Each structure stands twice: as C-alpha cells, then as structure tokens.
C-alpha cells in the first residue's frame, strides 16, 4: 500500500544499493509474484520449503497443480514472509551459509502437510505439523483470513 511504498522510498534514500521486495509485489508483464518468498526463506536458512515434487508417493492426482509450503523448526507454519532486502553491493565470504532445518522429518508428515495446505490453506491445521507454542491468536487468524479490503474495522475494534 501507500505506507509501504513511502517506507520503501524513505529507506532507499538513506541506505544506498538496497532493493526491497514485498510479498504482494507482482511482475507487470505476467502478474506473477516478483519473488518466491518461500524459496528465499529456504535459501536464507529460515525455514524449510517443502515441495510437492519431493513427495515419493503422492496421495493426490499428480495432474493437479500443488503448492509447497515452508515450515520453521521454531514457528512451525505460524509465520509469514513479508519482504526481502537485497543488499546489492555486499560480499563477504566470512558470512556462513546456514541450511534450513528440515523439521518435517518423515514422508508421511510431508505428504499430510502438502495435502492439507493445498486443500484449504486457511484451515490452520497444516501449520501445526511441527509442535510450537508460538501460534497465532484467534484474533490474528481472523484478521489474516479476512480479505484486505475488509480488515480496517478489525483494526479499529
């Protein structure tokens, strides 16, 4: 929105050579996301991106388009990526690569995760595939499951 764009411009005026890409930004020619946040989170070691093509024996029709999802060992599925900062002119060979921890350890659980995420991503059951005490509250779930145009009354309440 307007505030995010203003914040992006403000930040970029003060810190040079940084790109900020938000989760809602789309490519103009295809209307696809500018960046796959789950892939970035996986590459950054924040959460493991579980892909449907990694399931050995899928329980769904393989002709159907299925989407993967990220699971954190700390937050399970109770988090969201909102932006990526790309530092264009920083190179440091001393920064260690930390691979993501694969918290969903069995094929059975991975299959259940991909299946439940694709059946109804708004149903929070898939988020609990790994135990965490860092869950969203009922109010947070209600807010996030409301389309953005209808969220303002919830903020004012």
Image (spheres, rainbow, N blue to C red):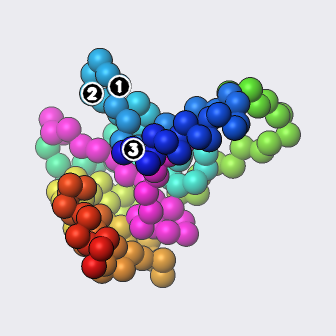
Q: Tell me if residue 57 is in the magenta stretch.
A: no
Which image quadrant for residue 20? top right
Q: Tell me if residue 67 is in the magenta stretch.
A: yes
What is the C-alpha distance between the residues marked 1 and 3? 18 Å
Q: Nearer the viewer, residue 134 or 152?
A: 152
Q: Is residue 37 visible?
A: no
Q: Is residue 130 left or right of residue 13?
A: left
Mark in front: 3 vs 2:
3
Q: Nearer the viewer, residue 8 or 137?
A: 8
Q: Which residues are magenta?
A: 62-84
Mark closer to the chain start, 3 or 2: 3
Q: Main secondary structure of the magenta part?
A: loop
98 in relation to 152, above or below: above
Image location (x, y in percent) of residue 46: 58, 54
Image location (x, y in percent) of residue 106: 42, 61
What is the C-alpha distance between the residues marked 2 and 1? 5 Å
Image location (x, y in percent) of residue 57: 28, 48
Q: Secondary structure at mark 3?
A: helix
Reading the image, the residue beneath label 2 is 31
Q: Nearer the viewer, residue 153 or 102?
A: 153
Q: Is residue 24 left or right of residue 133?
A: left
Circles 3 and 2, Cβ within 8 Å, touching? The answer is no
Local packing at callout 1 (Cα closer than 10 Å; few below 14, some 14-19, many 20+) is few
Circles 1 and 3, Cβ within 8 Å, touching? The answer is no
Circles 2 and 1, Cβ within 8 Å, touching? The answer is yes
Q: Is residue 151 visible?
A: yes
Locate the C terminus by quadrant. bottom left
Reading the image, the residue beneath label 3 is 2
Mark closer to the chain start, 1 or 3: 3
The residue that appears at 30% across and 74% down in the rendered structure is 156
What is the C-alpha distance between the residues marked 3 and 2? 19 Å
Local packing at callout 3 (Cα closer than 10 Å; few below 14, some 14-19, many 20+) is few
């Amino acid at each position: 929105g307007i505030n995010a764009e203003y914040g992006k411009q403000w930040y970029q005026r003060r810190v040079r050579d940084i790109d900020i890409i938000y989760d809602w930004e789309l490519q103009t020619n295809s209307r696809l996301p500018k960046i796959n946040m789950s892939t970035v989170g996986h590459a950054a070691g924040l959460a493991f991106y579980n892909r449907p093509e990694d399931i050995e024996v899928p329980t769904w029709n393989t002709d159907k388009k299925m989407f993967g999802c990220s699971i954190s060992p700390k937050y399970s599925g109770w988090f969201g990526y909102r932006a990526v900062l790309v530092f264009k002119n920083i190179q440091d060979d001393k920064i260690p690569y930390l691979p993501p921890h694969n918290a969903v350890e069995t094929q059975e659980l991975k299959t259940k995760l991909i299946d439940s995420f694709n059946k109804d991503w708004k149903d929070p059951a898939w988020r609990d595939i790994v135990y965490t005490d860092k869950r969203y509250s009922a109010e947070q779930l209600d807010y996030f499951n409301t389309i953005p145009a209808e969220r303002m009354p919830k903020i004012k309440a």
